[in-house]
Amino acid sequence: MTENQRIKIIRKFLGMTQVDFGASIGLTQAGYSDIERGKNNVSGKIKIMLKQVHNVNLTWLESGEGEMMDSTIPNEEWSPERFADDQKQIENLKVEIERLNAENKLYRELLDSKLKIIATLEERFGKG
């Protein structure tokens, strides 16, 4: 898998359009689209923006090794504003976890349904 393919995975993981994701890292939709399609490479500047803006693990982006997102959180000085920002981030993460759990449940139900169909068809095939 290439960096270009991984950057698309990051965008989809974040639930962003090409327009919004491109803008977040300083690109137009067309410029970003060229990266996803492999027409242009992921430049060093883009990698820095991905790290700063979206906390992307650059090792994963470059090699596929490790986690997609950097899980380290910088140790910053405490302030009421920082506390409020952290609380907001916690709430956003909880909402995202709930959404992903619901989505995961739907996928498991779909998988179970497909497995039942396969079992029924195989049973029919075995009797025929």
Image (cartoon, rainbow, N blue to C red):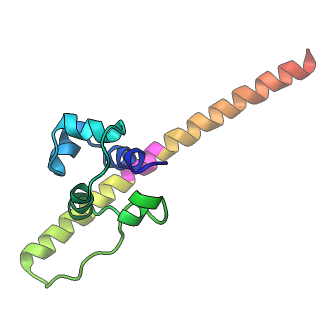
Helix, strand or loop: magenta stretch: helix
Residue 38 appears at what percent x and percent y? 36, 39
Could you say which quadrant of the image residue 30 lies in? top left
Q: In which quadrant is the C terminus drawn?
A: top right
Asked whether residue 100 is drawn in magenta, I would say yes
Residue 116 appears in view:
yes
Residue 65 appears at what percent x and percent y? 49, 64
Residue 17 appears in view:
no
In this picture, is 105 found above or below 55? above
Numbered circles on residues, count:
0
Residue situated furthest bottom in the rendering: 77
Residue at horizontal 51 percent and vertical 44 percent from the top? 105
Residue at horizontal 24 percent and vertical 41 percent from the top? 32
Say whether residue 33 is left or right of residue 78. right
Asked whether residue 32 is drawn in magenta, I would say no
Q: Nearer the viewer, residue 77 or 65?
A: 65
Say whether residue 40 is left or right of residue 2. left
Residue at horizontal 23 percent and vertical 55 percent from the top? 46
Could you say which quadrant of the image residue 126 lies in? top right
Residue 111 appears at what percent x and percent y? 61, 37
Give the magenta range. Answer: 98-103
Q: Nearer the viewer, residue 55 or 103?
A: 55
In this picture, is 21 found above or below 70? above
